[in-house]
Image: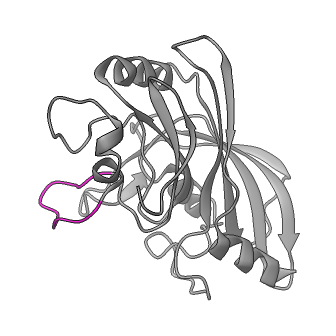
Amino acid sequence: MKNLKIIYEDEGLMAVDKPAGLLVYLPENHKEEKTLVSLLSDKTSFESDGERNGIVHRLDRGTSGLILVAKNKKSEFNLKKIFKERKVEKIYKALVWGKVEPNEGKINIPLGRGSKDRLRVVPKEGGRESITEYKVEEYFPQKNMTLLSVNLKTGRTHQVRVHFSAIGHPVVGDKKYSKRSTEINRQFLHAEKLRFVNPFNNEELKLTSNLSDDLSEFLASLS
């Protein structure tokens, strides 16, 4: 459990503050390394050693912040159900290039896998419905960057990164979907808040993760 901060835990689930750089689980044919699943294995009660045991949604390696983990099969089923039914509010902090206008908006662009690079996600006609809402929090004219609060209405792979790149405002530090270089060495994207009704006791949970040190220090340098 070293370096992992648990924000909330009960008999069925955990909310973990995932650091940037940590994989949630090992992809196929990936070299062996520590993952969120392996670090939490002593906190769950799955019979097999499957790499995705307990994972009901995911964060990219370079994204920090809140992620829910099921502790057993029943919990995994119930949590996947509320995610599928879009009953989990997911709020991210994102810093993007350029001045985003208007101050509030919605991006509704279907997404799918690239035809040449299957690890790349692209806007695609006939792709899966993908909806991102945002609010501008602050514009930094000296660096031409905008801090956003992002409400992820759907949960597609790389959704925030691809959507803002598609409208000309790629996430700062994103090496995959932006060609712009910056002083920060990973994408400025943080899963800040989760809100949902706990399926085990019907109580509303409102969970928050503060910006990680590298992101908060970078943000302070812009002012």
Percent x, y for residue 217?
73, 78
Horizontally, is 137 left or right of 125 in the view?
right
- Residue 26 is a magenta residue: yes
Q: Quadrant of the C terminus?
A: bottom right
Residue at image coords 55%, 70%: 187
Q: Nearer the viewer, residue 116 or 180?
A: 180
Residue at image coords 46%, 29%: 13
Residue at image coords 42%, 45%: 58
On screen, 75 above or below 30?
above
On screen, 36 above or below 80?
below
Q: Nearer the viewer, residue 92 or 107?
A: 92
On screen, 43 above or below 144?
above
- Residue 174 is a magenta residue: no
Horizontally, is 206 left or right of 58 in the view?
right
Percent x, y for residue 28?
15, 54
Q: Nearer the viewer, residue 89 or 119?
A: 89
Percent x, y for residue 42?
30, 42
Horizontally, is 79 left or right of 149 in the view?
left
Percent x, y for residue 175?
46, 76
Q: Quadrant of the N terminus?
A: bottom left
The magenta segment: 25-34
Say how the picture is coloured.
Answer: one colour
Which SS type dominates the magenta stretch? loop
